[in-house]
């Protein structure tokens, strides 16, 4: 059988794909006005960075990246107390030594060492410059008459029953996990007994055990639950309304470079999983949407995919949407055909679980010796990012079209 000849993208087609990829995905995430604004900002940023890279020496670049890493962590830690900073300094000294030792055995660990060193340098900078520390004392709640005794354990059950109606199973698991930690720390006591300092203490107790972003998510979950207690009339006022989350520098998901994507494809030796990775880059769909995709929502003849919520996976904001396919997406779907109701299934002929996808993906990232900051969501950002940079979407398209899943050329991306 003659090998199918790939149609080369014209400039007009590339421009159209660019608009339909990067711009549309940003509009979906941020809304039409904000999405278009971010699209233009990224274009300008790419142009400015390209100009800077042309004029910057390797020494200047290394110095700039080092300072950017330190500044990021200064911004994250500047809201801590001096006592917390001093405690972290001792902890980070050990982290730097450990990372340096691991790097000596495995050069691929260099990025982990650089991040550990940046955290330590940021802490030292704040200790040496206490005027940059921004700490606000928590407000003390005035003593009020005790409200009706409503125990946390009782409220927890009612709240979980309430959120079951509109939360995805994964979200529900996270809420139950947060409540478990919260109740273990305070025990079972009346909602009216909680004061702002309690949540501050809980926040401090989690420090060092989990990442700052996880603590912030837990604080949001607790505050949302107590707001519902106020709405239900179980509390006169919200005890935690003015407790702030831990500031975490806002970072867009890190997209893959073409070389990184090539390396990733090259180490994936699981056909079904490689299809998922390629499908994610070509469609921009989220992890849960991909593993929850069913054949009933795929129309190959019309080249359309309908993304809808299911029992296990909820579409973000509850919005159904249609996604067009190109020829390569069609081919991936043809290769994935099976008797299962789900499009993507594992070797046991069962649909993937989100945790499994995350674990396998991170394993391949490390196997390819790629930066640990690359996550599955980076594939979605890559879809948008490559569509915005001139020529990059064509490279992405060609990388997928020229990589084949098979015995003779398994998982090779010839970019």
Image (cartoon, grey):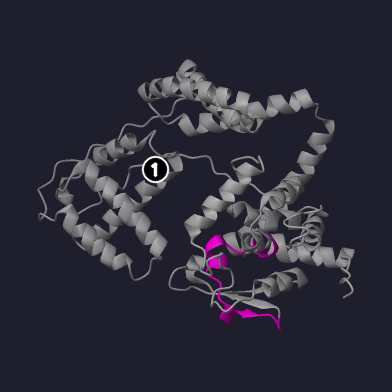
Rendered residue at 28%/67% (across/down): 162
Q: Secondary structure at mark 1?
A: helix
Q: Residue at x 51, y 24 (%)?
A: 98
- Relative image position of residue 196 (x, y in whole percent): 26, 41
Mark 1 = which residue? 215
- Image coordinates for residue 167, horizontal then vertical, percent: 38, 66
Q: Is residue 287 magenta?
A: yes
312 shown above or below 377: below
> Residue 3: where, in percent of width, then height?
87, 71
* Residue range of the region highlighted in magenta in the rendering: 279-302
Determine if residue 325 is in view.
Answer: no
Please tell me whether residue 83 is drawn above or below residue 180 in the rendered image.
above
In the shown orientation, is residue 87 left or right of residue 63?
Answer: left
Identify which residue, 200 or 98, lies in the foreground: 98
101 and 139: which one is in front?
Answer: 101
Dot 1: within a 10 Å radius of its alpha carbon, few (fewer than 14), some, or many (20 or more) residues?
many
Q: Quadrant of residue 410?
A: bottom right
């Amino acid at each position: 059988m003659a090998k199918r000849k790939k149609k080369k993208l014209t400039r007009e087609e590339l421009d159209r794909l660019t608009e339909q990829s990067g711009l549309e995905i940003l509009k979906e995430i941020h809304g039409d006005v904000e999405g278009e604004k971010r699209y233009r900002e990224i274009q300008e940023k790419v142009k400015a960075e390209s100009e800077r890279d042309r004029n910057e020496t390797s020494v200047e670049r290394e110095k700039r990246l080092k300072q950017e890493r330190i500044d990021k962590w200064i911004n994250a830690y500047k809201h801590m107390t001096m006592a917390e900073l001093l405690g972290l300094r001792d902890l980070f000294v050990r982290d730097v030594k450990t990372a340096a030792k691991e790097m000596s055995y495995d050069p691929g660990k260099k990025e982990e060492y650089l991040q550990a060193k940046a955290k330590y340098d940021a802490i030292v900078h704040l200790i040496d410059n206490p005027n940059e520390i921004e700490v606000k004392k928590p407000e003390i709640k005035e003593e009020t008459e005790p409200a009706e005794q409503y125990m946390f354990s009782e409220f927890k059950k009612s709240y979980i029953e309430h959120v079951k109606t509109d939360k995805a199973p994964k979200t529900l698991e996270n809420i139950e996990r947060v409540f478990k930690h919260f109740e273990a720390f305070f025990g079972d006591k009346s909602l009216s007994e909680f004061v702002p300092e309690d949540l501050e203490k809980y926040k401090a107790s989690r420090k060092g055990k989990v990442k700052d972003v996880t603590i912030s998510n837990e604080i949001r979950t607790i505050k949302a639950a107590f707001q519902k207690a106020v709405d239900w009339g179980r509390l006169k006022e919200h005890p935690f309304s003015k407790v702030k989350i831990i500031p975490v520098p806002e970072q867009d998901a890190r997209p893959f470079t073409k070389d990184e994507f090539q390396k990733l494809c090259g180490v994936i030796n699981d056909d079904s999983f490689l299809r998922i990775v390629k499908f994610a880059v070509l469609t921009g769909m989220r992890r849960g949407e991909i593993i929850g995709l069913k054949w009933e929502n795929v129309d190959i003849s019309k080249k359309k995919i309908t993304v809808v919520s299911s029992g296990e996976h909820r579409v973000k904001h509850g919005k159904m949407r249609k996604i067009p396919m190109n020829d390569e997406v069609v081919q991936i779907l043809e290769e994935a055909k099976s008797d299962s109701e789900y499009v993507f299934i594992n070797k046991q002929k069962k649909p993937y679980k989100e945790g499994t996808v995350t674990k396998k993906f991170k394993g391949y990232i490390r196997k390819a010796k790629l930066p640990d900051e690359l996550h599955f969501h980076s594939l979605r950002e890559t879809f948008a990012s490559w569509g915005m940079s001139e020529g990059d979407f064509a490279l992405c398209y060609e990388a997928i079209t020229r990589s084949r899943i098979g015995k003779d050329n398994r998982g090779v991306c010839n970019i």
